Amino acid sequence: MQLTTSDALKRVDSAASLLLTLLTGALAWPPCAAFAQILLQTAPPAASVQMKALRGALREVADDRRVLGLGTFRCWAIDAGKPVQAANPGPPSAPSSRNASLHISSPSVSAFMRTTTAELNNTLGLFMQQKSEVATAQVPLVVTLVVHVHPETTDREVLDITRTSWTRLNAAVNGRSAGEGEVSVQVKRGWEGAND
């Protein structure tokens, strides 16, 4: 079989296209992964201690007699590239298997059949323990809240509501330590602009 010039060029073109596609993908992957970590920030699980404290703080702010209601509330975690640490970490001599990452290689079917029940229970127990450690983890949160107050509220009362709201939310977000979380509170008189 003899290749004509156009057949040879088609094969070279296909190979060059494949090579360029692979190089483009290899160059684009690191920034895409970094942007995905930033764009896909989420709040910690609702069952976490931090979120329970935050819900309690929001309830306290809403119960103030000067507050008409809570407006826009946003909460997200800033944990991209940061290791998740448990709120109550184990002693320094704790084995490395207690870290919050679990890596199990994909076993073949024959290797899976050789796994004993004790090994499987040990792996599942480790996974459940790590899941509970992640649920109690304290991650830096960013919280923004709009508080609507009565239109007749004085400037001094608005300042007091802002300070009280910020203090309660900051205590819930950062706990007793000076954490890395951020809290922003905006106080508006009345319900005008509630959809902003």
Image: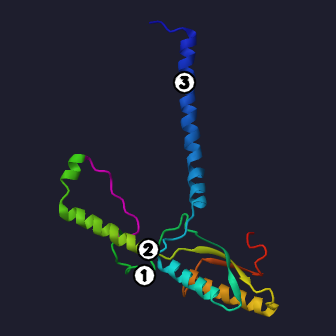
Residue occupied by mark 2: 135
Precedes in sequence: disc 1 or disc 3: 3
Question: In 3D space, how far apart are the residues under numbered discs 2 and 1 (Cα atoms)?
Answer: 11 Å
Asked if residue 12 lies left or right of residue 158, the reply is left
Q: Nearer the viewer, residue 80 or 154?
A: 154
Residue 190 locus on image (x, y percent): 77, 81
Dot 3 surroundings within 10 Å: few (below 14), some, or many (20 or more)?
A: few
Precedes in sequence: disc 2 or disc 1: 1
Dot 1 surroundings within 10 Å: few (below 14), some, or many (20 or more)?
A: few
Residue occupied by mark 1: 88
Q: Secondary structure at mark 2?
A: helix
Q: Is residue 117 magenta?
A: no
Magenta stretch: give its range: 97-108
Q: Secondary structure at mark 3?
A: helix
Q: Nearer the viewer, residue 76 or 147?
A: 147
Residue occupied by mark 3: 14
Precedes in sequence: disc 3 or disc 2: 3
Mark 2 or mark 1, which is nearer to you? Answer: 2
Which residue shows up at 60% across the image and 51% down it?
Answer: 31
Which residue shows up at 54% across the image and 64% down it?
Answer: 81
